[in-house]
């Protein structure tokens, strides 16, 4: 009876803690909504780049529609699951060995930001991940709503990665909410079509709009840069930082600009790869090149085998005729 009471108390405490974190998440969501409205207003009054109203309306409609779909499908499962996992793993991970709360908070944020950098880079390196991630890059006009242009499969992958980080590090629920709020704020910031004083100076530490715009270029040598979610130090450290103006925003050969098309786009390996050329032609050329290489290597090996056999036969014949065969004594006896 006592054990059942203890387990019930623990379960109740867990749900109460989750409710507190959820309310903290509600406050964070309200603040982020205000930030989104602020960025939207600045974009309207002083945009960094001039965008046609029709194109901008299409972008807003697609991005907000995708965000609403993701919120209905994913948020009811993903966010509570991460918070519950954070409470279960609190005090068990690597951060448990750090007794300084501010230090623990900073380390958790830096670790998650580095993890997101690595995941973002992987999304550009592997076609199976790019197939999903290209939905985010498919917006031809970069604006604050582009921050929420994410396919739900990519949200699943991101949350799985965050869940691993929560388990390994032992991130607390409230700390997880704060980290999420910071990441979302900076994601909105560096997608916003705005400019401000000190932007290049801040770019030494964080990803700012002028740094992130090149990441949405149609050219692979430009969009395979500046992967950072918040901090720009990872791009500087790993040599992926680029400071230049993109020629064009978007993805080559992809025209999905409505909710249904964007959802389908995440399941389709389109003719345009991150590099731009036809994937089928690319892989066909790669297969042809591999077959040619195998043929050349086989031919060389076959010729080498014949030459070795021929040389061996000639050597045996020469030794037999000379009568100096140490390896084959029968020839020596016959010659004597």
Image (spheres, helix red, strand yellow):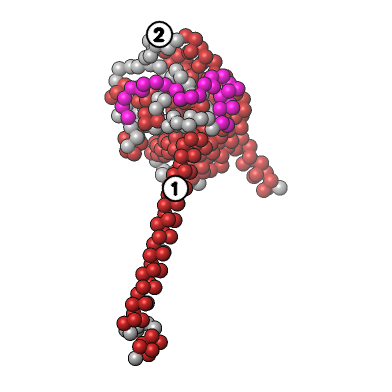
Circle 2: is it few (<14), some (14-19), or many (20+) Cα within 10 Å? Answer: few
Q: Position of residue 183 (x, y in %)?
A: 44, 29
x and y percentages locating residue 55 in the rendered image:
48, 13
Disc ID at residue 292: 1
Which mark sits nearer the N-terminus, 1 or 2?
A: 2
Chief SS of the magenta region? loop
Report helix, strand or loop for mark 2. Answer: helix
Q: Image point 62% across, 28% down: which residue?
A: 73
In reply to whether residue 259 is colored magenta, the answer given is yes
- Say above or below: 193 vs 228: above
Span highlighted in magenta in the image: 242-268
Q: Nearer the viewer, residue 163 or 152?
A: 152
Q: Answer whether residue 226 is visible to the viewer in this image.
A: no
Q: CA distance from mark 1 to mark 2?
A: 59 Å
Q: Provide the residue designation for mark 2.
A: 45
Mark linked to residue 191: none
Q: Is residue 212 found left or right of 80 in the rendered image?
A: left
Element on which disc 1 rests:
helix
Q: Position of residue 4 (x, y in %)?
A: 69, 46
């Amino acid at each position: 009876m006592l054990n059942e009471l203890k387990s019930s108390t623990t379960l109740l405490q867990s749900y109460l803690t989750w409710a507190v974190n959820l309310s903290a998440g509600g406050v964070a969501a309200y603040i982020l909504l205000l930030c989104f409205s602020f960025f939207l207003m600045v974009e309207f009054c002083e945009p960094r780049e001039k965008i046609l109203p029709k194109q901008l309306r299409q972008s807003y409609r697609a991005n907000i529609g995708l965000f609403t779909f993701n919120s209905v499908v994913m948020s009811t499962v993903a966010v509570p699951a991460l918070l519950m996992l954070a409470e279960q793993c609190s005090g068990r991970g690597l951060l448990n060995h750090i007794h300084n709360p501010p230090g623990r908070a900073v380390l958790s944020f830096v670790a998650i930001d580095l993890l997101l950098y690595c995941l973002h880079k992987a999304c550009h390196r592997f076609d199976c991940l790019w197939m999903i991630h290209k939905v985010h890059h498919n917006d031809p006009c970069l604006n604050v709503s582009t921050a929420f242009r994410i396919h739900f499969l990519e949200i699943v992958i991101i949350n799985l990665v965050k869940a691993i980080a929560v388990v390994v590090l032992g991130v607390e629920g409230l700390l997880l909410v704060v980290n999420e709020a910071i990441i979302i704020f900076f994601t909105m910031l560096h997608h916003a079509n705005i400019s401000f004083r000190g932007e290049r100076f801040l770019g030494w530490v964080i990803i700012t709009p002028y740094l992130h715009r090149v990441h949405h270029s149609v050219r692979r040598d430009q969009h395979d840069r500046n992967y950072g979610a918040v901090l720009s130090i990872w791009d500087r450290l790993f040599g992926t930082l680029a400071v230049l103006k993109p020629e064009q925003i978007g993805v080559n050969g992809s025209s999905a600009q409505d909710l249904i098309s964007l959802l389908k786009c995440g399941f389709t390996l389109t003719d345009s790869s991150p590099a731009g050329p036809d994937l089928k032609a690319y892989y066909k050329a790669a297969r042809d090149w591999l077959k040619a290489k195998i043929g050349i290597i086989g031919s060389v090996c076959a010729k080498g085998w014949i030459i070795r056999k021929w040389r061996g036969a000639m050597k045996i014949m020469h030794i037999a005729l000379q009568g100096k065969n140490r390896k084959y004594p029968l020839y020596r006896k016959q010659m004597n």
